[in-house]
Amino acid sequence: MNRIFDHKLKKERIIIDPGEYYVTSSDQIIYTVLGSCVSVCLIDKKANLYGMNHFMLPNSAEKIFFKKGEFAKYGENAMDLLIRRMLNRGADKYELTAKVFGGGHVLNFNGSGADVPINNIAFAIQYLEKAGINIESMDVGGTLPRRVFFYTETGEVHLSYIKERTILI
């Protein structure tokens, strides 16, 4: 996770990478870039708590459970850790709402990897439904990567698509 001051937006921007999550009650921007990965933004307006994760795969075949300080690249762990952190900071599970982003088919997969974006989206939706967390909005699927700007002052998300792809050789 990196922190920068965004001079254009005049706010601190927290950049989360795959396998990371972040929770705050401060006026910040939580930012990530998504391809086939999924991010879930959680909001508890009454408690003034906002969080976002960024996971790569729905779950681990080995059922790995991460210790404190380790990354949560699997949705199962990323969701558990994000919710637990929000509840520990005073959120009420019944006040949480979610916004879901990502799961784009951004790579040309040959074989079973083609299901990764679909599985990530399905996992996020099913997990939130099972947890009783209302999905307020979603922007998932498609073929383009996304930039996600989560404004914690308002709970709004500004999203842009990355239309040009750069290939490094």
Image (cartoon, rainbow, N blue to C red):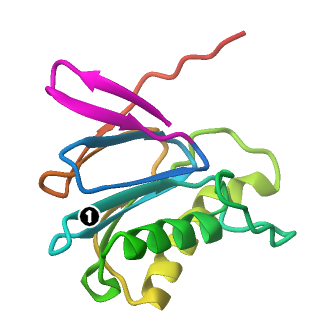
Q: Does residue 4 appear left or right of residue 109 in this picture?
A: left
In percent of the image, x 63 and y 67: which residue is there? 77
- Where is residue 161, by image quadrant? top left
- Where is residue 115, by image quadrant? bottom right
How far across and down, in percent of the image, does residue 67 sit?
72, 61
How far across and down, in percent of the image, does residue 63 sit?
81, 72
- Where is residue 14, by image quadrant? top left
In percent of the image, x 48 and y 55: which residue is there? 53
**In this orientation, does residue 102 appear?**
no
How far across and down, in percent of the image, does residue 167 sit?
62, 16
**In this orientation, does residue 68 appear?**
yes
Residue 62 is a magenta residue:
no
What element does badge 1 sit on? strand
Amino acid under disc 1 = Leu
**According to the image, label 1 marks what residue?**
49
Most distant residue in the top direction: 169
How far across and down, in percent of the image, does residue 155 sit?
19, 58
Query: Vertical placement of 90 versus 70: above or below?
Result: below
In percent of the image, x 36 and y 83: which residue is there? 133
Position of the C terminus by quadrant: top right
In percent of the image, x 80 and y 67: which residue is there? 64
Q: Nearer the viewer, residue 70 or 162?
A: 70
Q: How many marks?
A: 1
Q: Does residue 96 appear left or right of residue 112 in this picture?
A: left
Most distant residue in the right direction: 62
Q: Which residues are magenta?
A: 1-17
